[in-house]
Image (cartoon, rainbow, N blue to C red):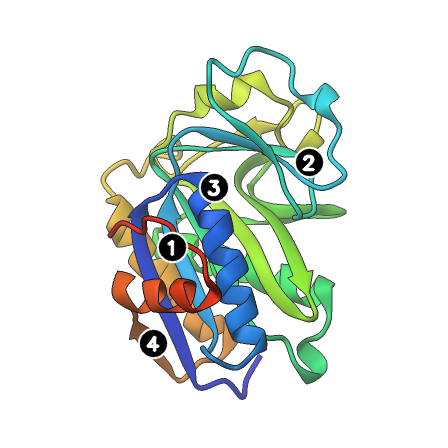
């Protein structure tokens, strides 16, 4: 993909899931009104489970141990987010030939495959399934939403998070799905922020941006306030 100029990147640290939803809504509106350019939020969530808009609750198979659960507007089934997992929410305006959902999904997968390759981990795709895999082990999940060709939701890739938290669900509705992480694949020395740096750079490269611009909480607050919303954004 080419023809893009600046990718705005917000590294938000740990942020509650509801606050991230509200922030995405505000940014999608701002992007559609051309008040901001393309932006990706990179962050972690406290433990939370989410269901896609058409997800079946039968895939929750055990107690969630007081972790909240949200049904949201992304595609896909049930998944888990928690500390040590890198979550990316791209807010991109898809135009021209980029207005292709399958192309967008495959491009997100390629970003993560390339970032893992920089860590000497050979990952790839599986026929008929969305996400990123190491042989038959799943390391990254993808579930997106698109409003008037502006994207929201995105990807989650396991870095150092507790994989036992997936035991309460059938991840992504895939029976016998085994989840893995960078740490579980023998790369525990790769720090979370180091891997986030790799993903940031690969995202810009694969999507064809010329420059990366870091944006902070003050700029995000400005977007949110103009929408009439209020939330706490941490960095």
The residue labelled by disc 3 is 18
Q: Could you tell me residue 113's position as x and y percent?
A: 50, 55
Tag 1, which secondary structure?
strand
Q: Is residue 122 visible to us here? A: no
- The CA span between labels 4 and 1 is 13 Å
Q: Is residue 119 above or below residue 198?
A: above
Residue mark closest to the camera, 1 vs 3: 3
CA distance for labels 4 and 2? 32 Å
| Secondary structure beneath label 4 | strand
206 sits to left or right of 52: left
Q: Residue at x 41, y 58 (%)?
A: 41
Q: What residue is at 75 percent from the left and 28 percent from the top? A: 56
Asked if 76 appears above or below 224 in the picture, the reply is: above
**Which residue corresponds to mark 4?**
212
What residue is pinned by disc 2? 77
Q: Are marks 1 and 3 in contact (CB under 8 Å)?
A: no
Of pointers 2 and 3, the one earlier in the residue sequence: 3
Residue at position x 31%, y 51% in the image: 233
Q: x and y percent of residue 138 in the render?
A: 56, 37
Mark 2 to mark 3: distance in Å? 18 Å
**Residue at mark 1:** 42
Among the two numbered marks 4 and 1 on one chain, the one whose residue lies closer to the N terminus: 1
Is disc 4 surrounded by few (<14), some (14 to 19) or many (20+) residues within 10 Å? Answer: some
């Amino acid at each position: 993909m080419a023809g893009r100029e600046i990718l705005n990147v917000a590294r938000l640290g740990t942020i509650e899931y509801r606050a991230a939803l509200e922030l995405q809504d505000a940014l999608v509106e701002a992007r559609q009104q051309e008040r901001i350019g393309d932006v990706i939020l990179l962050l972690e969530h406290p433990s939370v489970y989410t269901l896609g808009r058409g997800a079946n609750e039968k895939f929750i198979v055990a107690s969630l141990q007081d972790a909240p659960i949200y049904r949201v507007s992304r595609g896909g089934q049930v998944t888990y987010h928690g500390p040590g997992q890198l979550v990316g929410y791209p807010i991109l305006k898809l135009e021209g030939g980029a207005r292709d959902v399958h192309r967008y999904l495959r491009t997100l997968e390629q970003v993560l495959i390339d970032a893992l390759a920089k860590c000497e981990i050979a990952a790839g795709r599986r026929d008929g399934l969305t996400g990123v895999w190491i042989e038959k082990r799943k390391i990254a999940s993808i579930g997106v939403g698109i409003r008037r060709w502006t994207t929201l939701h995105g990807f989650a890739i396991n870095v150092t998070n507790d994989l036992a938290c997936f035991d309460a669900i059938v991840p992504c509705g895939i029976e016998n799905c085994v989840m893995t992480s960078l740490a579980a694949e023998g790369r525990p020395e790769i720090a979370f922020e180091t891997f986030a740096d790799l993903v940031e750079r690969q995202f810009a490269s694969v999507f064809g941006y010329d420059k990366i611009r870091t944006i902070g909480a003050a700029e995000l607050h400005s977007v949110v306030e103009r929408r009439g919303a209020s939330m706490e954004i941490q960095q």
